[in-house]
Image: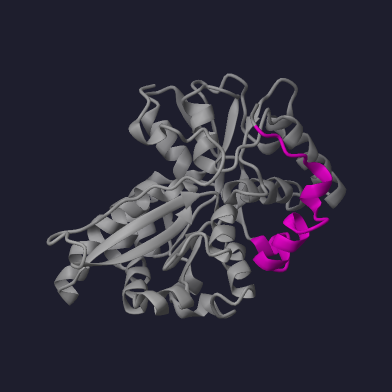
Amino acid sequence: MKKLPWLNGLAVAGAVFAIAVVALHNRGADSAIRLLNVSYDPTRELYKDINREFAPWYRTKSGTTVEIAQSHGGSSSQAKQVAKGELKADVVTLGLPSDIDGLAQRGLLPKDWATRLPNRSRPYYSTIVFVVRHGNPLLIKDWPDIVRPGVDVITPDPTTSGNGKLVALAAWGSVVTRGGSEDDAKHFLKELYQHAPFLLQAARAAGVAFAVEKIGDVHLAWENEALREVGESKGQLEVVYPPVSILAEPSVTWIDGTVAANHTEALAQEYLHFLFSDAAQEIIARDGYRPFDQAVLARHRDRFGDIKLFSVTDIAQSWAEAQQTFFGENGIIQTVYAPKPRS
């Protein structure tokens, strides 16, 4: 496969910072309002497309030119950098509601942040699916298949990556929502991590290892990443939809203190409300995310495979409770996994 320009350097650990500037006219230093969108790893293409649509729309509406910078990395790592002030986010568009809950607990935004935008601040959904080599030579169809002898699993680290966290929750739920016990689920998770040759910090780097470097037999990926990888593989890869997986609920909000300091509150709110518009929902569907708007989803239904999606509330009380139970100090993940940096 031809190595695309955006793949350069993504194998290194740590947050990946990419700037996408959208401006229409008068690009001088004082001519545009600037907004920083701190997002999770696979959304580079999505927000580049969103920004390309939003900037002229906003200029027509307000007469103001907008420049939007994007920062991408593992969702949990991104949230931690925002919490520490290392990333001065005007808006965050992260992979899990619990990543934003963590920012609210630190006082960066109200604890009822999810009520400030439509659909509890969730403009799109996703899930975790499998990517396999052409012809699916190992006949991987369901979660138990990925822990058969000889199968190497590529998945991000659950301590840094939203993709990694969702893999853990999806794997756990694939057991307990189909009649297995919590002990069965814990044993399955432990086996899964034993089948991973390494755990990279973020989703895109894991995808590069699998799709470009051709390491591993199955990649546990965001659905949108799986669709992109397969589309760019020229027939070398296939998507497999397991019978069940988790309903992922990426969430968005503005960071109150930052937008007040930057005088970008109105712009940040307009930007996030735009994600729920018909125009943005169409872009979201085309880029492989499941739009919250059911009419748009219906128009693009053939883009997405059939799969039973269980809610986080089928395995925990809430995203916040799942975060603490699975990924908090002395949580389930600490009992079944050990860090596996790439050598």
Quadrant of image for the C terminus = top right
> Residue 124: x percent and y percent?
44, 60
Whether residue 329 is in magenta: the answer is yes
Quadrant of image for the N terminus = top left
Identity of the residue furthest to the front in this view: 29
Nearer to us in this view, 30 or 145:
30
> Residue 85: x percent and y percent?
53, 64
Name the colouring of the figure: one colour
> Residue 130: x percent and y percent?
56, 36
At 52% from the left edge and 47% from the top edge, which residue is drawn? Answer: 15
Identify whether 342 is placed above or below 83. above
At 21% from the left edge and 70% from the top edge, which residue is drawn? Answer: 58
At 59% from the left edge and 69% from the top edge, which residue is drawn? Answer: 103
Question: How many discs appear?
Answer: 0
> Residue 279: x percent and y percent?
27, 62
Identify whether 193 is placed above or below 177. above
Q: Left or right: where does residue 232 sit relative to residue 248?
A: left
Q: Left or right: where does residue 10 sit relative to residue 220?
A: left
At 56% from the left edge and 41% from the top edge, which residue is drawn? Answer: 129
Identify whether 253 is placed above or below 18. below
Residue 305 visible at all? no
Q: Which residues are magenta?
A: 312-341
Whether residue 279 is in magenta: the answer is no
Q: Left or right: where does residue 26 sit relative to residue 267?
A: left
Identity of the residue furthest to the right in this view: 183
Residue 277 visible at all? yes
